[in-house]
Image: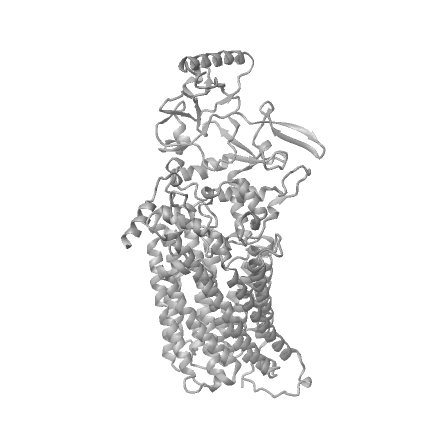
Amino acid sequence: MTKYDDGPVKVMLYPAILFMILGMFFGVFIAFNGLVFPDYFAGEYVHFGKVRPVHVNTVLWLWLISANIGLFYFFVPRLCGVSIWNPKLAYSQAFLWWGGLIIGIYSLPAGTNFGWEYAEFPNWVWLIPTKMMVTISFILLAVNVFMTIGMRKNKKLYVSLWYVMGTMVWAIFTWVAGVYAINYVPGGISRVNVSFFYVHNVVGLIFTPMGLAIVYYFLPKISNRPIYSHRLSMIGFWSIAFVYAWIGAHHIIHGPISQWLQTVSIIFSIWLFIPVWTVVTNLFATLKNDWSAYVQNVPIRFLIMGVMFYLLTCIQGPLMAVRNINEITSKTDWVIGHSHISLYATFTFFAIAGIYHVIPIITRKPLWSESLANLHFSLNILGSIPFLAALWVGGFWQGLLWSTWANGNTYAEFHHNLSVLPFINTVSDMHVFWIWRGIGGIIILLANIIFVVNIFNTIILKTEDRDDLKLVSNL
Amino acid sequence: MINWYNIEKSALITFVGIVLLFSFSTAIVVIAPRHIDPTWTEPTSRYQVQMYEIADPNIYIGNPVNGGYDLQFVYHLKDQFTLLAFEESEFTKIMAPDDLKKYVTAYKDPVLKLTANLNLLRKPEKEMLTKSEELKKQFQAEWIANHPNWKDEKLLIPNFEIYELYKPLESFAFSVGIPETIVNEWVDSNFEIIGSEDTEIKIPYHSEPGVIFVKNPIEYKISYYNYAGGRGWHYDPNGDAIKDLNELVGEKLQFHSRKDLIENGENIYKSEGCWYCHTDQTRTLIQDTVLNGSESFPAPPSSANEYIYQEVSFPGTRRIGPDVSRVGIKQPSRDWHRGHFWSPKTASVGSVMPSFQHFFDTDPRGTSKNNAGIPNYKFEAIYQYLMTKGTRITPPNQAWWLGKDPVNTLEIIEGRRRGQK
């Protein structure tokens, strides 16, 4: 049996789990300090505009992508039947990754914002080339992954490996376009276009294939059932590759960007139904004849709920791109809800499921508490509902309020509506929804603190302290 | 060793396929649009070009006692570069030596005379003073002759302003700017540029059918004084002229060009994260044109060429605060912005905007009667940046807020509504 080196998994996963809590804490902080009790803690470094990018970048880069890379280091060697090609390369990758990201992201309150969404952290912090460190880190990761796959013993390339290889290529392309190439296109809408291309590809061509690689590996693995259809997963893969790169401009529908480009992005957004339905069908069909696994197993519950939310987010996405629905939902909290359902309720759920499965294996100890894991799942769902529902209902409501200005026959009538309903009233009407969002956020934060405690105890407590210990076979 | 034979055909196809697909779309996004749609890179308004390239770098803004109330605006005039107009009005008259008379546009003259030759106006001095007094009496006598019933109509005899046109020694000068102007003097018909034949070659914009110019420049002078805390300065018509640009932007006076302030403002907008809560686009939706429109007229939707002078653009994704793309017209008051940045929640009730008190200094002399702080350069920068929004789409004489309609907004939105019924 092959002996796998799990050091790289640990150096990526352990810090990522802590950054999840930190990122969620920043999220709860701005939910309250920004919106529920606006500006309660006031000042140059703690106001909403400074903390929001810290929250977004922490959960995006320091938690989600880092955790996903950790899981890659776990299952890519196992799918290939060989240990990771070069552990030292992986450690250098982790070092550059954490160094660049931590320094870059936590310099944001000092005013180093790069100005483009999801790429906010700066090129340089003092003499440290933070973005270059992350770039090199991406390349080292890709080299390591491709070499491992090149040396594999298992001949068949499982679909997860397709997604992993795709992610490696897309991540580097997307990153280079959004972080470097954007400086070399003319200022103005050309840059906005590149930025939205980048923003959507971070989600569509990094998070999505990473998340799907994980769910395609862990769902059959944990439930011990073969994947329903290999062919369906191929259709999903290629339609993602074909569709996602074209939909960036749907972030600026009705905006100052050329109409034909908006139309192109809308058409491709609607095509997104193809990859989503194939993926969802495939994953549900895998469990089709045996749902007992769902009841008995926390990671499977996270995976399946993640797939449910994935279905939901991908129904929303194409619909939000349609011009007249966009007129209501765009620029409201609906959008914030949509980004949370995909990055939190879908891909974070997938990563959590993966961690629940991976930690006992790499530490060779069973999970510290199954009942805490159950509680973690229940609280996560309980928190997600007020959180997401408040954003959707509030956002849609605000969008409807705004559209009442466009009521009437003459401009005078339109403008009269503005005196009946000034903009500021549509903001203060959101307060009750923001309270519910904050409550949901607190529940989610609590749930994940339980998760971290559980994982931490699993890792830290010695075997002799654990009378429940059962030896886990080396997978 | 790598067993390369393990790389089967399907893996190779995967790799080549995604690289091809994705690099194709990257190329399209990065390269193509600006070649397909020229509005992405080219301005549509000559006014916009000249505002950004001619006016902004040559308007300097400064602050004498960190006070903020008497913010100073100074034009940097350059010989054979800045276009000047010397225009008389009903009560403003210009005395000029014979060789400079051709530059003066008389009252009610339909053609505005512009020149790139540097000349300035000043209050008459010494022997010219007596001459000007005579002229003034002469004008007043004329006025009385034209208004025989002025006492019955309860009119006052106007106090005619008399200026003297002269040629300064240097090839540059600093003139008094009009405070807090967000639009510049602009003329696009009935004007002629006189007195410099080779100007067109040197300064290409002079040949365009519309030009920005400086009207009736008077030299900017200051004098220094001592106070408890140190040495201060203030605007003084009888003081000393400014020697050169280095003095203006130097340690003592600390003026900044409007261009620098706008760029700085963009950086502040970026690093403070304003763009997470404010959008910078009037969408092609009735609700947006109404939200940003004036009482009687809708705002034109944002077009791509409004953004071409920006390093980073912030069309935005969320409106927790109102859209800023027309704020230069909707809310031009500097005093309002001071109060609002200091304490947004009191300035507009219901707002969730954080206060930006780090845009203000504490009052160094303790003499400010205002309970808000004194704006520092950060405030001036963000204010100047915001004032570019919506003010540069078209020349001021075609401006949408005056009811001119560059893109037929009104027709479209009202027509569409009626069509629906």
- Is residue A260 positioned above or below A290 on the image? above
Q: Which quadrant of the view contains residue B70?
A: top right
Q: Where is residue B323 drawn, in percent x and y?
A: 46, 50
- The mark tally for this picture is 0
Relative to B248, is A81 above or below? Answer: below
**Is residue B219 among the parts visible in the rendering?**
yes
Please state if B401 lies on the left or on the right of A14 as rendered. Answer: left
In the image, residue A237 sits, relative to residue B74, either above or below, namely below
Viewer-side residue, B218 vs A434: A434
Front residue of B155 and B47: B155
Rendered view: B353 above or below B384? below
Residue at figure coordinates x 55%, y 48% from the top left: B268
Q: Residue furthest front?
A: B152
Tell me which corner region of the image, top left, top right, bottom left or bottom right, holds residue A319: bottom left
Which of the two residues, A309 or A324, is positioned nearer the viewer here? A324
What is the quadrant of the C terminus of chain B in the image? Answer: bottom left
Residue A128 at x, y = what percent?
60, 57
Q: Point out residue A196 in the picture as x, y percentages from the top left corner.
A: 43, 58
Left or right position of B156 against B379: left
Q: What colour scheme does the image use?
A: one colour
Can the viewer see residue A202? no
Work out which residue is located at the far right of the displayed protein and give it: B228
Residue at left offset 47%, top offset 13%: B135
Q: Position of residue B405 (x, y in %)?
A: 34, 42
